[in-house]
Image (tube, grey):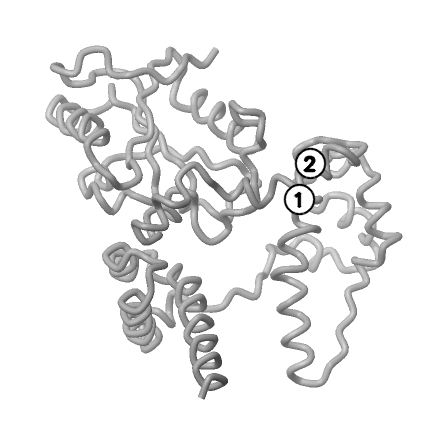
Amino acid sequence: MLSPMEAVPDASSPLTHGFLLIEPATLVHTPFLQTLSLHSCTPRVLAHREELMPKLLDVASLEPDAQAQVTDIWLEETETDRPPVVCAWIDSPLTMDELASHVKLYLVGPSANGNPVFWGGEEGYTHVQKLRLLHPDLRKRFRGLTSWDAISPIRERFLANAWDKSDLHWMSYLDLNLRLPELLLMRVDKMSMGVSLEARVPFLDHKFVELALSIPAKAKLGSGGTKYLLKKAVRGLVSDEIIDRRKQGFNVPLPEWFNGALGATARSELKSFCADTSFLDTNEVMKLLDSPARASAWYLLNFALVAKQSREGVESAAV
């Protein structure tokens, strides 16, 4: 059984055992931790967001000098205003793999207060990243609030009406209510209308959706991985080569763009936006643009450009 997360028993001595739970979003603040071997805790359903998932560090596997350094980092966490890098020290008899399995279950199961940890509100940034990027004034204003405050009404409807309250059905329900209309359908609508096409989405026929949501989660997963039932239903109608090939997404090449001209444009626009408004922390935004994850500043750039356009529209109307 997983033991509770505890305080370091003797702060005067280096940690020699246990595990540290690391927040990857803030690793930039501690270069030393980036040189150590960190164990992944990413659930399969969240594999596409590996860079946002917490990591584990086995303290016992470190040399004495390294143990002393990570202890200092852990103790310093209570003295900083930024979100933590080391979230917890866990004293557990479990192996690294066993403990990682517990963390994976926690990430997709209920949290200590009964809320599901899979919120669906952190596709762009984790909660810790959001706190870090916010202007200090907003950080204080929104203290105690999370994405859950926006998603909880959807959760309440789900619990009141869903016949199957499994994690898989919750994920599906949340996507249907949030990501599908706000992101995916919006993109299809804009791109198709931009070239005078009338797009159709047959998988969203309400009868088909009702059928899909009436199928138990266990039957959907089966033993064939993702899209198990769909692949089984069309095998013989669609070639095996297409059914069994690796998924091919339509990702925008943001890393390449941000390593080129768009990176300079983003830096200029965001620097100006931070100077003119009180939404974002200038230093943290610049750190993000200097980091390997600079492409994630795409979200901030869009926000800044929309805000800029809105301000210019208001100013024009007032003239």
Q: Tag 2's secondary structure?
A: helix
Among the 4 quarters of the image, the one containing residue 119 = top right
Which residue in the structure is indicated by mark 2?
156
Identify the amino acid type marked 1: Thr
Q: Position of residue 180 (x, y in %)?
A: 67, 57
Between the C-alphas of marks 1 and 2, the distance is 27 Å
- The residue lying at 53 percent from left, 47 percent from top is 121
Q: Residues within 10 Å of mark 1 (few under 14, many from 20)?
A: few
Identify the amino acid type marked 2: Glu
Q: Is residue 15 visible?
A: yes
Vertical comparison of 119 with 187: above or below: above
Vertical comparison of 235 with 219: above or below: below
Q: Tag 1's secondary structure?
A: loop
Say which of 133 and 211 sits in front. Answer: 133
In the image, which disc is placed on residue 10? none
Q: Which residue is at the far front? A: 318
Q: Which residue is at the far bottom? A: 319
Question: Tag 2 or tag 1, which sits nearer the N-term?
Answer: 2
Say which of 176 and 278 sits in front. Answer: 278
125 sits left or right of 285 in the view: right
Which residue in the structure is indicated by mark 1?
226
Q: Is residue 218 visible?
A: no
Among the 4 quarters of the image, the one containing residue 261 = bottom left
